[in-house]
Amino acid sequence: MQTHLNQQLKNLAISFASTFIHLLQYCTRRIQVKKWVTRKLWLNVHLFLALGVGFIFAILGFTGSVCVYREALDELLNPQLVIEEVQGGYQSLDQIMASVRSAHPDRHGEWTLEMPMSANGMMTAWFDKPRETYFERYAPLMVSVNPYTAEVVASRFWGQTLTTWLLDLHTQLQFEQAGWNVVGYCGLLLMVSVCTGLYLWWPSVQNIRSAFKVKFRSGLMGLLFDLHRMMGLLSATALLLLAFTGFHLSFPSVLENLSGSTGMAHGETGRTITSTAIPNNHPTGLEAAEFIARGPFAKAELRRVTTPDGNSGVYRVNLRQKSEVNQRHPYTTVWVDRWSGQIKEARNPAVFSTGETLITWMWPLHTGEALGAYGRLCWFLAGQSLFFLYVSGLVRWLHRKGKIRDRAINFMALRDFDVRLKKSVYQLLLSIDRWMNVLAQKALPVISRMVVTLSKWLVYGFDYYQSKVRK
C-alpha cells in the first residue's frame, strides 16, 4: 500500500514538473516573440511618468537635497544662532524654561525643549499650536535659547524661514494635507520610474560593455542620453531608498499595520499618558524629571523634554541610547508624573520587534542621518540627480519630437576656451601684482613719514608725562 502511494506521488511530481517545463517554454517563446511590445510598454510608462510628474520629482529632489543640510544652512543665514565662545556648562532646564515663559507669558500649554546637536548650537523650545498659525497643518513657534546663559536669542514660526519653507515644499508642496498625500504617492511613482529606467537600460550579455560607455563624439543629444542613463544607474539605489522611506513618512500607517504597532510615526510619541496623582504644592521640576527618567537608561543622552499640559499632564522625556540609529528623534521615551515624581511608563527600543525596528530606520535613512557625513553627501547628490534626469530626459524627448536640433560638440573649442580663460586669469593676476607694487612704492614713503611723526609724538608725550610726574 505504501509502495503504491509513493509511486503515485512520484508520477504526480513528474507530471507537474513536465507541465511546468512546457509552460516555461511557452512563456519564453511568447516573450521572445513580443519582446518589442514589452519594451515599448515600459518605455511608455517611463515616458508618461517623466512628462506627468517628472517636474514634481525634480522639485522634491532639489528641495530634499538642500534639506539634508538644513541646520547648517539655517546657521549660515542666521549667525546669531551659533555660539562663538562656549562658557561653562548648561543652565538648568528649569531656568531655561523660565526664560522661555518670561519671553512668551501668554502661551499656555506644553512646551518641548530640544537639546542642541553640537556644543555651539542653540537649544530650541517648541510650542506646537501658537494662535498666529493655529489653523495651519504644522507651524509651531521655535524659540532659540542660549543654553549657557538661558538667554532667548530668537523666536520664529515654522514656515516663515527659508529652511523650514523649503522643508514644507519638500514634504507637502505647500498644499497642506492634499500636498502631503501627493508627495506620498509620488514616492510610489518614483519607484516605478526608477525600476522601468533600469529595465530599459538593462543590456544583453553581448552589449554589457557598451552599456557603461559614454560617447563624447556622438553629438550633444547622444552625450546627454548617455549621461542620463549613467546618472540614473548610479543613483538608482539611493533613489529607491529615498522613495520608499518618503512614502512611509507620508503614510506611516502602512508599515505600522504590517508590524502590528502604533505611535511609531515620525514625530509621534506613542499613546497619550495622563497623571492619576492628586495635584499638590510640590510638583516635580524639569531637572528632577530628567533625573528620574534616566533611572532605567543611565547611559542614555537627553534629546528633549516636554512639559505637562494641564493638571493631568505628565513630563515626556526623550532619550537616545547608543544602539539607536536615530540621532535627532530617538524612540527611547520615559513618562514622569509631575505630582508624584514616579515613572508612569517607559518605551525601550531594545525590545522592539523586527517590524518596529525597521520603522525606526525610516526617518534617519530618508535624511541620510543614519549614513554619516559621506552618506549625507551621497543623498545630496542623489537628490540633485533627479533634477538632471528630468531636464536631460525632457530635452531628449523634445529632440525626438523635432523641437530641438542636435549639435556637434567641439571639444577643441572648449579646450581653446580653457586655455584663453587661464591666460586671462594669469594676466589679471599679473596686473594686480603690478598695481600693488606701484601702490606700495608710492605709499611706502608716506607711511614711513607717518610712522616717524607718530613716534616723535609718542616720545614727546612720554617726556611730557615724565616731567609732570617729577614735579
Image (cartoon, rainbow, N blue to C red):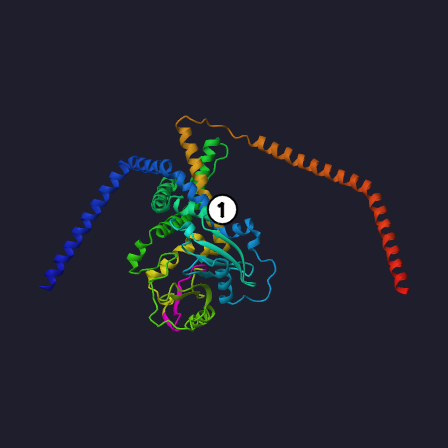
Q: Nearer the viewer, residue 16 or 141?
A: 141
Which residue in the protein does label 1 denote? 162
Kind of residue at badge 1? Leu
The magenta stretch spans which residues? 327-344
Q: Quadrant of residue 459?
A: bottom right
Q: Residue at x 49, y 46 (%)?
A: 162
Badge 1 crowding class, 10 Å Cα cut-off, few under 14, some 14 to 19, many 20 or more, is some
Where the C terminus falls, by quadrant?
bottom right
Where the N terminus falls, by quadrant?
bottom left
* Residue 286 appears left or right of 37: right
Q: Nearer the viewer, residue 445 or 397?
A: 445
Looking at the image, can residue 365 be seen?
A: yes
Outermost residue toward the left in this view: 1
Q: Position of residue 213 (x, y in %)?
A: 46, 39
Total marks in image? 1
Whether residue 421 appears in magenta in the rendering, the answer is: no
Whether residue 342 appears in magenta in the rendering, the answer is: yes
Q: Secondary structure at mark 1?
A: helix
Q: Position of residue 197 (x, y in %)?
A: 37, 41
Task: Answer above or below: position of 212 versus 414.
Answer: below
Q: Position of residue 396 (x, y in %)?
A: 42, 32
* Residue 351 appears left or right of 101: left
Q: Nearer the viewer, residue 53 or 465?
A: 465
Task: Answer above or below: position of 367 versus 217.
Answer: below
Q: Position of residue 175 (x, y in %)?
A: 38, 43
Q: Residue at x 90, y 61 (%)?
A: 467
Looking at the image, can residue 232 be seen?
A: no
Q: Nearer the viewer, residue 368 or 219?
A: 368
Task: Answer above or below: position of 54 versus 158.
Answer: above
